[in-house]
Amino acid sequence: MILTLKVLMTPVLIAAITLAGRRWGQGVSGWLVGFPLVSGPISIVLALQNGTGFAARAAIGTLGGETSVCAYCLAYCLVAQVAGWPASIAAAALAFFAATFLWSLATPPLLVTLAIDAVAIVLFLKLIPRQAALPAAAVPPKWDIPVRMLLAAVFVVALTTFSNSLGAQLSGLISPFPVFSTIMAPFTHHQQGARTAIHLLRGVVLGSFALLAFYLIVNTLLPVASIPLTYLAASSMAIVVSGISLRFVHPVQPLTVE
């Protein structure tokens, strides 16, 4: 069920977020990527299939994985200033796996995990170059969104298949890999330049605050409240936090299609 959910949702969300970026700017697109659009529904499935206690514990792991996602974004942004998208994506992937490996060496409780996440997000936002994105100069080709959707499905199937062949610990290290950013950042970098890709990934890091709020509520309420009430409260809190963080995203002139 989880694989089906990922395969069906991820390509559709990739297309929707791409269109949002063309309308309101890549910073907004990245901000949307930071929202628990895929991990949230998967958390609900985990709660239904494996029980609320399991999903509550898994929420802490997801919070820990968000630090690795932010490290991914920082590495890409730093390398993108001096190199193209292939070197940037390689550095980002290396940073992600290095961070997840370090995180796997310890299992801190919820509050410690949140503190580490918050400090990391603030630090990475300061380290990521604060550059305004430039509006796209040309209309992307018609095959752009279909190829992004196809790559999203391939990524999900490949990562899930690979992780299923490993043990539980290594599977946990691989599962939070940022599929959305891995597809959108190189496309944006190639089509609109490094500055716009950096703007996109800065939005991803900024959007992480919504994910923290979501899983804080999930971990706190799920053991004592019903599943619908828990995820309604978590989604509401994430929306509130997203609304606050969106004020720090600077939109650019939208892309006009002739």
Image: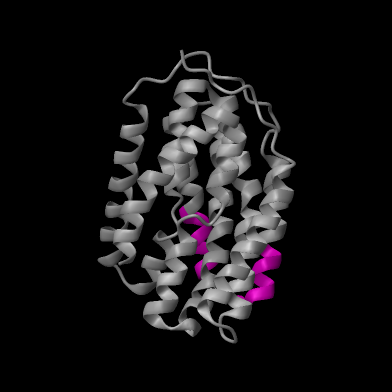
Look at the picture and state if 91 lies above or below 137: below
Is residue 15 left or right of 250 when viewed as pictured? left
Give the farthest residue toward the bottom: 224
Residue 201 sits above or below residue 176 on the image:
above
Using the image, determine if residue 226 lies above or below residue 136. Answer: below
Left or right for 150, reference 249: left
Q: Main secondary structure of the magenta part?
A: helix
Q: Position of residue 43 (x, y in %)?
A: 46, 69
- Asked if one can make out residue 57 in the rendered structure from this viewpoint, the answer is no
**Image location (x, y in percent) of residue 204:** 58, 45
Residue 224 visible somewhere in the drawing:
yes
Is 141 part of what is drawn in magenta? no
Quarter of image, res 252? top right
Q: Quadrant of residue 186?
A: top left
Looking at the image, which residue is at 53% across and 52% down?
69
Q: Residue at x 35, y 56 (%)?
A: 6
Residue at point 52%, 65% (across, down): 62
Residue 145, placed above or below residue 100? above
Q: Nearer the viewer, residue 222 or 94?
A: 222
Residue 231, image quadrant:
bottom right
Q: Is residue 100 magenta?
A: yes
Q: Quadrant of the N terminus?
A: bottom left
Rendered image coloring scheme: one colour
Residue drawn at 25 percent across, 59 percent down: 161
Q: Residue 60: x and y, percent?
A: 56, 72
Q: Count all numbered tags in the image, as a single digit.
A: 0
Residue 52 on image: x %, y %: 48, 82
Which portion, as a residue range, is magenta?
97-116
